Image: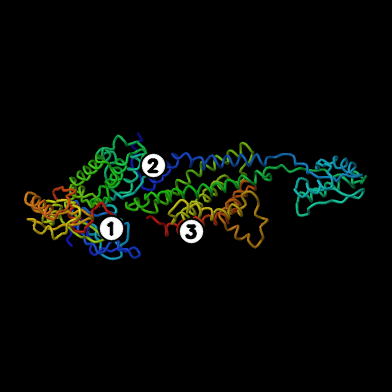
Amino acid sequence: MSEPRPIRSPLTELTIFRLKEFIREPDAVFWVFAFPLLLTVALGFAFREKPPDRIPVGVVDGPFAQRHLAAMKQSPALQPRVYSDREGKEALRRGKISLLVEGDAVPVYRFDPTRPESRTARVEVDDALQDGAGRHDAFAAREAHVTEQGSRYIDFLVPGLIGMNLMGTGMWSISFAVVNARLKKLLKRFLATPMRKVDFLGAQFLSRLVFLVVEVTVVTLFARLIFDVKVRGPLWVFCLLCLLGGAAFAGIGILVSSRARTLEAVSGLMNVVMMPMWICSGVFFSYERFPDAVKPFIRALPLTALNDALRAIVNDGAGAGEVLPQIINLSVWTVISALIGLKIFRWN
Amino acid sequence: MTNHAAVSCVGLKKHYSDVKAVDGIDLEVLRGECFGLLGPNGAGKTTTIEILEGLNTSDGGEVRILDLTWEHDEREIRERIGVSLQETQFSEKVTVYETLRLFRSFYRRGRDPEELLRGLSLEEKRDARVGKLSGGQKQRLGVACALVGEPEILFLDEPTTGLDPQSRLQLWDIVAGYRARGGTVLLTTHYMEEAERLCDRIAIIDHGKRIALGTPRELIARLEAPHIIDLTTLPALAEEDFASIPGFHGATRRAEAWQLRVDSLAASVPELIGIVEAKGVKLETLSTHAATLEDLFVALTGRELRDV
């Protein structure tokens, strides 16, 4: 028996109804909670801290091959191997090695200068061969390696993943719930009651925010415990940005699902909306490499704003003032998309 | 239009591209009565009732519900009517009670969900998920959600379509119980038996038009013949062959079968057998029954309700 609590306002009852509907759907729970966690684990381990790999390079067999090989073996950055001329060129073409050493006492470096790893190999191989040939360095610089929190790839990745999860789960859970209710004529049935439309959409927002708190907490705690990713900025600013991000994507979710009559249609629309943000908004890599001309557009996207703000708070310790542009951006997205969505919403 | 009408509409029209789904229907449902829209599938019943429920727009005509209009008093009307749609699927993962209390929260006043569940014999299913209910139980939950706001008018669109006979009887009892509390009912159906049993007055709808209106008794009386003879012969007879039958009121032909409307079986059956013998045709089937709404529909349209 469920508890005989008094019947509350439509907004509260709709929100509770939606929460119950959701947590009793095991598939949905997996995609919202378990999947982001698994993704964080997988990517976290894939990009975990480890010594840099040695660069594979080749030497063409010949009178000087053994001398070059021995010199390159002295370098901690290289992994040299002897090839025949034909095999060596083949290995280079296929990317098995980054550079091929040809020639005699004065070597020829064969490599593709557009590949960053090959350019690194060019420097390392040249150093090794010069040293082997008796070059004296003017000095031997000491190296200071950066492993500080905030500069590792995982530090870059975690805020991006939180942002991406907020977008994905927010948009999917709302739009599927809305289109499903439309398909089953439940929206039409609600329309036949005195229920206010704004309560229905408000309940979608509120139930979404409840799950968002759980979702963000789980990923943030996990990243803290396993990868030692700490939120350096004020926690309330971090929470505020997560809520604003959730609200913006809930609004866009409502907009996207406001007219769609089938799950296929809404899935298609969803991908059209999310794809540019997956690519451009700096989830897995920085968007700094995009041409300057398109950057203002990229920064206007809600996921870019959210990711930039979360990174600034988590890694640089930014406060509310520093992420004000992003706060404004997300608020505008929330209000505009929700208002348009409500205006054009199809109940029948 | 008097202020006794719970629902009234005049000249109601709805066109979909070139199809006239509703083509100038006038209706007046009095307070406290059960009014039925009877007609075959596709006759325009659902479009009509959905316009009256404020869920669809009309292309012409005037609608008043409890002397209010949808344009000016939508929320007020919604508070005072209850609607059960033909094809609503409630969320499968929530329970019967949870669904009902959600609907209760939408209304300013209404009935206690627990009491309503008892009244609808759903108390044993109170904590069952909607997905586990039978068709009849789901339909009763739908009606419960329509009744939970304690409406003055209950709209039911095809309430028993697809239900087993027992579930149908349970639903009829619920409608009777609601009427005993003083409620007004407007329902659509394509079961003439349902219309005869439940409704005080019936409008027969075909091709978006009202083709007959009255109490079940009045409508059947319009046939002017209390008995129906179904006759098949090989080859079929012509209508003028029946002219000599005493108390003959007309016949409708469907393929090889004739349906004859007569005053008295005792007078007409022997005469009919005589005609069959005189014409030298082979008698295939001959049966008789008391006239029903179904027969009126056949007489009016030449088709059966179950057709289309």
The chain to which mark 2 is attached is: B
Residue position marked by numbered label 2 in the rendering = B92
Q: Name the amino acid type tagged 3.
A: Ile
User: For the residues marked 1 and 2, what is the alpha-carbon distance in whole angstroms?
Assistant: 30 Å
Q: Residue at image x 89%, y 45%? A: A62
Q: Point out the frontmost of discs 1 and 2.
A: 1
Q: Name the amino acid type tagged 1.
A: Gly
Residue A227 point in image, percent of width and height: 64, 38
Figure quadrant of residue B212: bottom left
Residue position marked by numbered label 3 in the rendering = A336
The chain to which mark 3 is attached is: A
Relative to A114, say whether A82 is above or below. Answer: above
Helix, strand, or loop for circle 3? helix
Figure quadrant of residue A35: top right
Q: How many marks?
A: 3
Relative to A334, say whether A19 is above or below. Answer: above
Q: Point out the frontmost of discs 3 and 1.
A: 1
| B243 lies left or right of B176 | left
User: For the residues marked 2 and 3, what is the alpha-carbon distance in whole angstroms?
Assistant: 33 Å
